[in-house]
């Protein structure tokens, strides 16, 4: 009998690394340059305290760090800790992943109608992981195949829709299921 073991590494962000060039060129993502395993709160603060210049610099957000209630949440923030963060702060967060030039949902918030609603991109590279703030979801996902001239996107399946009415009709059914990959 052979027994193989590996170290368990739960999904969670850490520190800055350069994102793929195709994502960088979309100008839809803010990639905060951090080295402190706090990419999650810095990305959240970019949404709450948007900056027009140097938005990728950590120095823009340090003074706002105390605005977030991070009690009981360890760094690097794991995806399973996001619901706790949402409850402690008036915010809902959706997390998308990206591998092999494809986007997929990782976590979709059940908290609707919060003061802040935002999307994060979770990336992995050579054993490291990192959260980035998605500033323009439509711009980011419109670059994918089969998106056509999408008006809005369903965060559960990332399918594009040409009107709000059609999206709402779709969400009645799609939101009943777990995220689709």
Image (cartoon, rainbow, N blue to C red):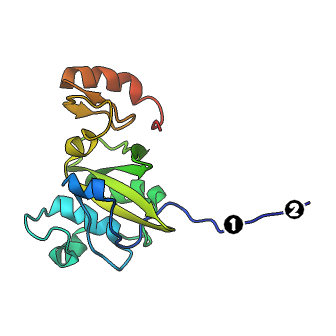
Helix, strand or loop at disc 1? Answer: loop
Q: Residues within 10 Å of mark 1 (few under 14, many from 20)?
A: few
Q: Position of residue 7 (x, y in %)?
A: 65, 69
Whether 140 is drawn above or below 150: the answer is below
Q: Residue at x 15, y 67 (%)?
A: 55
Count of numbered badges drawn on the protein: 2
Camera sees residue 30:
yes
- Mark 2 touches mark 1? (CB < 8 Å): no
Q: Position of residue 73 (x, y in %)?
A: 42, 68
Q: Residue at x 46, y 62 (%)?
A: 78
- Which disc, if any, is residue 2? 2
Q: Looking at the rendering, in which quadrant would you find the N terminus?
A: bottom right
Whether 46 is drawn above or below 28: the answer is below
Camera sees residue 89:
no
Left or right of residue 43: residue 128: right
- Give whichever of 30, 86 is nearer the camera: 30
Q: Residue at x 39, y 57 (%)?
A: 122
- Which disc, if any, is residue 161? none
Whether 144 is drawn above or below 132: the answer is above
Q: CA distance from mark 2 to mark 1?
A: 14 Å
Q: Residue at x 35, y 70 (%)?
A: 17
Q: Which residue is mark 1?
A: 6
Whether 9 is drawn above or below 82: the answer is below
Q: Residues within 10 Å of mark 2 (few under 14, many from 20)?
A: few
Residue at far left of view: 52
Helix, strand or loop at disc 2? Answer: loop
Q: Position of residue 87 (x, y in %)?
A: 35, 55
Residue at far front of view: 21
- Give whichever of 24, 70 is nearer the camera: 24
């Amino acid at each position: 009998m052979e027994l193989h073991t590996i170290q368990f590494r739960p999904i969670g962000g850490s520190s800055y690394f350069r994102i793929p060039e195709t994502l960088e060129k979309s100008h839809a993502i803010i990639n905060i340059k951090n080295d402190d395993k706090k990419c999650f709160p810095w990305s959240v603060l970019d949404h709450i305290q948007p900056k027009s210049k140097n938005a990728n610099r950590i120095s823009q957000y340090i003074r706002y760090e105390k605005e977030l209630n991070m009690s009981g949440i360890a760094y690097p923030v794991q995806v399973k800790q996001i619901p706790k963060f949402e409850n402690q702060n008036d915010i809902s967060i959706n997390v998308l992943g990206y591998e092999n030039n494809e986007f997929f949902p990782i976590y979709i918030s059940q908290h609707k109608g919060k003061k802040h609603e935002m999307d994060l991109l979770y990336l992995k590279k050579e054993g490291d992981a990192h959260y980035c703030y998605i500033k323009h979801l439509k711009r980011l996902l419109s670059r994918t195949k089969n998106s056509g001239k999408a008006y809005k996107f369903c965060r559960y399946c990332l399918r594009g829709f040409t009107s709000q009415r059609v999206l709402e009709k779709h969400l009645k059914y799609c939101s009943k299921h777990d995220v689709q990959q």
